[in-house]
Image: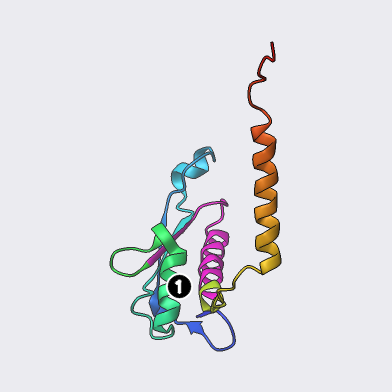
C-alpha cells in the first residue's frame, strides 16, 4: 500500500516492481547484484485517481508515461535494493501529489492607462537616442 495523502492510497496490485542490475560504477557489486528498481504504475486504469488528475499526471510524467497508460520510474542511485525501492515509491507518490493540486485559473487583465503611456514614452525616448546615433553631416 502506497500512501499518497489522507484520502488516496495506491493498492499494491497497481504497482509492479522489477529488479535489474544497475549501471555505472560499483566494481564487482554492480555485476552480481540486481539493485536497480523499475516501478510500473498503471495510472490510466487506477480507480483511485479521477480523470482530471490522470490528465495532469500524464503531462507531469512526460517520457515516463507509456503508450498503454503506465508510469515507469527507474531508481538506481544507491547500492541497496531496499533504498532504491523506497526512492522509486517516493518519486511516484510525489508526482501524484503534484498532480492532485488543481492549478489556478489565470484571469486576463488589461494594462492600465498609466502603464501604457509610460511604455510608449520609454519607446519614444529610446527611439530618439537611436536617431541621434546617425552619421554626422559635414557643414562645409
Q: Residue at x 53, y 38 (%)?
A: 25
Q: Is residue 83 magenta?
A: yes
Quick one: 40 or 18, which is closer to the camera? 40
Q: Residue at x 39, y 77 (%)?
A: 14
Looking at the image, residue 110 lies above or below residue 49: above
Scheme of colours in the image: rainbow
Q: Quadrant of residue 58?
A: bottom left
Q: Position of residue 17 (x, y in %)?
A: 41, 66
In the image, taking residue 139 as reference, residue 97 lies left or right, namely left
Q: Residue at x 55, y 89 (%)?
A: 7
Please identify the dominant SS of the magenta region.
helix
Looking at the image, residue 123 lies above or below residue 135: below
In the image, taking residue 99 as reference, residue 20 lies left or right, namely left
- The image shows a total of numbered marks equal to 1
Looking at the image, residue 119 lies above or below residue 108: above
Quick one: 32 or 91, which is closer to the camera? 91
In the image, the segment drawn in magenta is 71-97
Q: Residue at x 58, y 82 (%)?
A: 5
In the image, taking residue 48 as reference, residue 79 lies left or right, namely right
Q: Position of residue 28 (x, y in %)?
A: 50, 39
**Residue that carries the numbered disc 1 in the rendered image:** 56
Label 1: state its secondary structure: helix
Q: Position of residue 100 (x, y in %)?
A: 52, 79
Question: Label 1: few (<14), some or many (≥20) within 10 Å?
Answer: some
Q: Is residue 111 magenta?
A: no
Quick one: 30 or 136, which is closer to the camera? 136
Viewport quadrant of the C terminus: top right
Q: Quadrant of residue 82?
A: bottom right
The residue lying furthest to the front in this view is 140
The residue lying furthest to the left in this view is 68
In the image, taking residue 140 as reference, residue 28 lies left or right, namely left
Amino acid at each position: 500500500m502506497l500512501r499518497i495523502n489522507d484520502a488516496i492510497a495506491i493498492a499494491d496490485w497497481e504497482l509492479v516492481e522489477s529488479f535489474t542490475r544497475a549501471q555505472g560504477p560499483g566494481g564487482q557489486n554492480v555485476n552480481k547484484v540486481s539493485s536497480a528498481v523499475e516501478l510500473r504504475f498503471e495510472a490510466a486504469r487506477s480507480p483511485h485517481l479521477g480523470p482530471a488528475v490522470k490528465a495532469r499526471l500524464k503531462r507531469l510524467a512526460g517520457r515516463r508515461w507509456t503508450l498503454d497508460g503506465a508510469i515507469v520510474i527507474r531508481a538506481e542511485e544507491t547500492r541497496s535494493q531496499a533504498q532504491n525501492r523506497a526512492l522509486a515509491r517516493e518519486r511516484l507518490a510525489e508526482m501524484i501529489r503534484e498532480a492532485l493540486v488543481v492549478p489556478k485559473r489565470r484571469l486576463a487583465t488589461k494594462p492600465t492607462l498609466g502603464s501604457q503611456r509610460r511604455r510608449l514614452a520609454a519607446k519614444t525616448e529610446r527611439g530618439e537616442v537611436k536617431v541621434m546615433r546617425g552619421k554626422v553631416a559635414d557643414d562645409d
